[in-house]
Amino acid sequence: MGDSSASYIHMVHHLIEECLIFNMSKEECVEALSKHANIKPVITSTVWNELEKENKEFFEAYTRGRDQRATEMEKMQRIQSRLDASVRENIENGKD
């Protein structure tokens, strides 16, 4: 592999790390790098897969954390929706 190929892969690796900081999924990262950095999805996906192989425990924890945050957000949205409905009902019934 030439120096330019290695530096390109290193750059993609770095950009994937930036995606991880922003809590992106693999799919979101592939899309973002394709759109904003003009990196072919197959390249991002391949580098991501290699990083997963080399850092299995990290990616397992990362995925669990993403799943937990998504569950918490859904729960908060349901609570907010119920509160909004309760407030609307109270307003419609003339209660403060």
Image: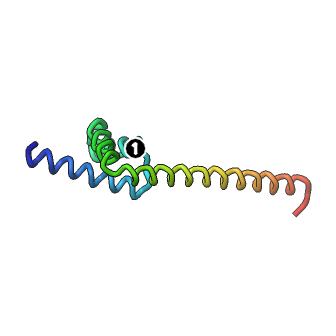
- The outermost residue toward the bottom is 96
Q: Position of residue 53 (x, y in %)?
A: 32, 45
Residue 5, horizontal then vertical, whole percent? 14, 44
The N terminus, quarter of image: top left
Image location (x, y in percent) of residue 43: 26, 39
Q: Quadrant of residue 42?
A: top left
Of residues 39 and 1, the one nearer the viewer is 1
Q: How many marks?
A: 1
Residue under the image location 9 percent in, 49 percent down: 3
* In-image side of 80 versus 86 (left or right): left
The three-letter amino acid code for the residue at tag 1 is Lys
Position of 17 with respect to 60 (left or right) is left
Q: Secondary structure at mark 1?
A: helix
Q: Locate the C terminus and report the quarter of the image it occupies.
A: bottom right
In the rendered structure, the answer to whether residue 7 lies left or right of residue 74 reads left
Q: Residue beneath label 1, please?
A: 26
The residue drawn where x is 44% and y is 50% is: 60
**What x and y, as percent, mark residue 40?**
27, 38
Mark 1 closeness class: few <14, some 14–19, many ≥20 residues within 10 Å: some
Q: Please identify the residue farthest to the left as the structure is shown.
A: 2
Q: Quadrant of residue 58?
A: bottom left
Its colouring scheme is rainbow
* Residue positioned 56% across, 50% down in the render: 70
Question: In the displayed image of the protein, which residue is found farthest to the top?
Answer: 42
Residue 2's quadrant in the figure? top left
